[in-house]
Image: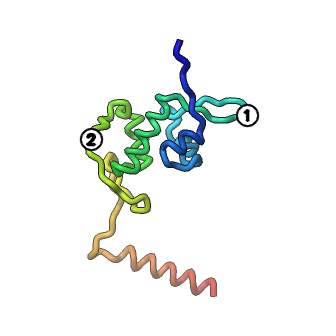
C-alpha cells in the first residue's frame, strides 16, 4: 500500500521559492483548489495534487501575467483544471502591474487629451491642502 506523502508548508515554500505567507494568502484567495490538511497544532500539510495546483497558480500569476481576479475567474468558470501547462509563458517582473487577460470589463482609462478629471482631482487636493493649513 502506497503511503501518500504530505509536505509541510515550509517544504512547499522552499520547493516553490515562495514565502510561506504567500501560500497562506493563496489558501484564502483560492479555497476551492488550495486546501491543505490541518495537522497537530494547526500545521498545514499539502498533498501532491495541492502542490501541483499551487504551481499552476504560481505559473499563471508570475509567468503568464494573470491577476488574482483572473485566476479566480478561471476557477469559478471551471477552466482551471483544463489549463494547458505547455502554453508559452512570458517573464514578467513581480513589481510590474499585470493586466488581467481574462477580465471582460476594462478599467476606465484617462485619455491623454482628456484631462478634466485630473484637473478636477488636483483642484480638490489643493482645496484640501488649504483647509489643512
Q: Work out whether mark 1 precedes mark 2 in sequence or the reverse, and give the earlier one.
A: 1
In the rendered structure, the answer to whether residue 131 lies left or right of residue 61 reads right
Residue 74 in picture, x, y percent from top left: 37, 38
Residue 113 in picture, x, y percent from top left: 26, 76
**Quadrant of image for the C terminus:** bottom right
Q: Is residue 85 above or below residue 122?
A: above
* Residue indicated by mark 1: 41
In the rendered structure, the answer to whether residue 113 lies left or right of residue 130 reads left
Q: What colour scheme was applied to this rendering of the protein?
A: rainbow
Secondary structure under badge 2? loop
Residue 6 in picture, x, y percent from top left: 57, 28
Residue 45 in picture, x, y percent from top left: 60, 32
Q: Residue at x 51, y 84 (%)?
A: 126
Q: Is residue 106 above or below residue 24?
A: below
Between 118 and 97, the one nearer to me in the picture: 97
Q: Residue at x 51, y 49 (%)?
A: 18
Check residue 27 in the rendering and tell me which mark sits there, or answer none: none
Label 1: how many Cα within 10 Å (few below 14, some 14–19, many 20+): few
Outermost residue on the top side: it is 1
Give the distance between the C-alpha atoms of the residues marked 1 and 2, in whole angstroms: 40 Å
Between 42 and 7, the one nearer to me in the picture: 7
State if disc 2 and disc 1 touch (CB < 8 Å).
no
Q: Residue at x 30, y 74 (%)?
A: 114
Check residue 87 in the rendering and tell me which mark sits there, or answer none: 2
Q: Is residue 1 above or below residue 58?
A: above
Label 2: how many Cα within 10 Å (few below 14, some 14–19, many 20+): few
Image quadrant of residue 128? bottom right
Image quadrant of residue 119? bottom left
Secondary structure under badge 1? helix
Q: Is residue 77 above or below residue 111?
A: above
User: Disc count in the image?
Assistant: 2
Image quadrant of residue 44? top right
Amino acid at each position: 500500500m502506497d503511503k501518500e506523502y504530505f509536505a509541510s508548508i515550509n517544504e512547499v515554500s522552499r520547493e516553490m521559492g515562495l514565502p510561506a505567507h504567500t501560500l497562506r494568502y493563496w489558501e484564502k484567495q483560492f479555497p476551492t483548489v488550495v486546501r491543505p490538511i490541518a495537522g497537530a497544532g494547526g500545521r498545514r500539510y499539502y498533498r501532491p495534487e495541492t502542490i501541483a495546483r499551487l504551481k499552476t497558480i504560481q505559473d499563471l500569476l508570475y509567468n503568464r501575467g494573470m491577476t488574482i481576479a483572473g485566476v479566480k475567474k478561471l476557477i469559478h468558470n471551471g477552466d482551471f483544471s483544463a489549463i494547458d501547462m505547455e502554453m508559452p509563458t512570458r517573464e514578467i517582473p513581480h513589481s510590474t502591474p499585470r493586466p488581467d487577460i481574462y477580465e471582460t470589463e476594462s478599467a476606465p482609462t484617462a485619455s491623454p487629451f482628456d484631462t478634466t478629471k485630473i484637473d478636477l482631482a488636483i483642484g480638490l487636493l489643493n482645496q484640501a491642502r488649504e483647509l489643512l493649513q
